[in-house]
Amino acid sequence: MSEHLQLTVDGAVATLTIDRPAKRNAMSHAMWSALPGLMDRVEHDDAVRVLVVQGGDNFSAGADISEFQTLRKGAEGARAYGEVVHAGERAIASLSKPVIAAVTGFCVGGGCEIALACDIRIATEDARFGITPAKLGIIYHFMSTKRLVEAVGPAWAKQILFSADLIDAATALRIGLVNEVHPAADLAARAKELAEVLATRAQVSVRGAKAVVNGITDGLHAENDELHALFEASYTSPEYAEGVRAFLDKRPPRF
């Protein structure tokens, strides 16, 4: 695990904090390497229902460029380093539980890659977003590009990738890169509020919805056996029975 990634749990909500302020939360090789193990802990903690990913003054300024002349030097080093980055990104994206990115300050390059791997993105009004491979002679990874296109559409994805320019939070909201924008003083409370709402909902529904939406964005045009099994499991789940009882009793459900 990395000293610059802190995983804490408060009730049903886990929080992953990127904590490397001296480098604007730039992601090192060690930090990317730690992500799969941390996500495994979240996945297998039955008490945790939602994950929030956050930074401090900055979400993450991206990759640690100082490693480009060491660990990432040469074609073979770049290839191996890239695999570690994408394994970390995939670990977040493949979590069965909902993930909220609470974005502050700079969210650039690998930081934007992490945010796009999350299901929901909320940001401060002063947040800045950018994906900058065009300044480094790198082609952005296929799956990360796919997530960008899904969020903002192909035209804006091309502008972001071609220009490598930073965009402000208002633009990010307008094009669909983020779901909500809030004053900096309100972001932490809003992330907590949203996470707690998701944690109170029927988890068979929340996780099933995530699987269905991901299936659609991955190209499914009809229900497959895996999704059919999810639908069938929901009908026989204790949460379905509780939801019906609560509706008939005119009370909030206790999931």
Image (tube, grey):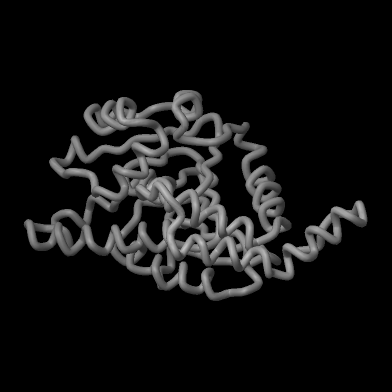
Give the quadrant of residue 76: bottom left
- Closer to the camera in the image, 245 or 20: 245
Image quadrant occupied by the C terminus: bottom right
Image spot of residue 227 (x, y percent): 49, 60
Compared with 164, 201 (above or below) is below
Compared with 218, 49 (above or below) is below
The residue drawn where x is 24% and y is 49% is 141
- Closer to the camera in the image, 118 or 163: 118
The residue drawn where x is 86% and y is 58% is 246
Image spot of residue 150 (x, y percent): 39, 39
Give the quadrant of residue 181: top right
**Can I make out residue 23 in this image?**
no
Compared with 225, 250 (above or below) is above
How many marks do you count on the picture?
A: 0
> In the displayed structure, does residue 157 sit left or right of residue 216?
left
The residue drawn where x is 41% and y is 41% is 107
- Closer to the camera in the image, 99 or 183: 99
> In the displayed structure, does residue 185 sit left or right of residue 209?
right
The residue drawn where x is 46% and y is 46% is 59
Image spot of residue 120 (x, y percent): 53, 45
Image quadrant occupied by the N terminus: bottom left
Residue furthest to the right in view is 249
> In the displayed structure, does residue 136 sit left or right of residue 209?
left
**Can I make out residue 179 in this image?**
yes
Image spot of residue 83 (x, y percent): 23, 62
